[in-house]
């Protein structure tokens, strides 16, 4: 089986056959094969594999692993709408502006307010289902 045939195979194993562990292992094997071979469009394939792996983790009630998988997928394609939608649906927060400082650090609090104030181009200011105010 070639790496390009893996993106959905592990997910199908997990969901159709209810073999979560097998599906997870298949996705991880696909990631290992991808690391060995350079392929055209590999960034998108990585994103798809991490998306499917995350969905398997959700089905297996492993939420934190799912979140981690979706975030890894975004490292390969930061605009992947499926990954972004899953993370939004899980209610996850973006990383703090200064990652090595805690969320409660005053610097992160201030930067978070400035970067994510209503109407800013960074997103968080608009309410769901409403356009600009």
Image (tube, grey):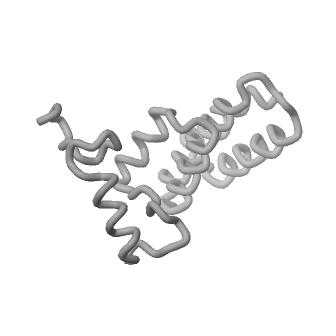
Q: Residue furthest left?
A: 133
Q: Give percent across and percent down for residue 4.
A: 75, 26
Q: Based on the displayed image, in which of its 4 quarters is residue 49 positioned?
A: top right
Q: Nearer the viewer, residue 82 or 76?
A: 76
Q: Nearer the viewer, residue 66 or 98?
A: 98
Q: Residue at x 61, y 34 (%)?
A: 48
Q: Give percent across and percent down for residue 15.
A: 54, 42
Q: Nearer the viewer, residue 109 or 26?
A: 109
Q: Give percent across and percent down for residue 97.
A: 45, 60
Q: Based on the displayed image, in which of its 4 quarters is residue 35 positioned?
A: top right
Q: Based on the displayed image, in which of its 4 quarters is residue 36 positioned?
A: top right
Q: Nearer the viewer, residue 23 or 84?
A: 84
Does residue 23 lie above or below 68 as drawn?
A: above
Q: Quadrant of the N terminus?
A: top right
Q: In the image, 126: left or right of 50?
A: left
Q: In the image, 40: left or right of 111?
A: right
Q: Residue at x 18, y 43 (%)?
A: 127
Does residue 127 lie above or below 58 as drawn?
A: above
Does residue 74 lie above or below 93 as drawn?
A: above
């Amino acid at each position: 089986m070639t790496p390009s045939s893996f993106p959905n195979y592990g997910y199908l194993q997990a969901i159709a056959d209810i073999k979560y562990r097998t599906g997870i292992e298949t996705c991880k094997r696909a990631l290992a094969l991808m690391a060995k071979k350079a392929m055209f469009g590999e960034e998108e394939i990585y994103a798809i594999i991490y998306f499917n792996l995350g969905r398997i983790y959700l089905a297996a009630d492993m939420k934190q692993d799912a979140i981690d998988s979706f975030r890894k997928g975004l490292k390969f394609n930061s605009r992947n709408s499926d990954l972004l939608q899953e993370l939004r649906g899980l209610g996850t927060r973006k990383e703090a502006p200064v990652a090595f400082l805690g969320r409660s650090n005053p610097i992160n609090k201030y930067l978070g307010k400035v970067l994510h104030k209503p109407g800013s181009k960074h997103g968080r200011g608009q309410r769901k289902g409403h356009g600009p105010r």
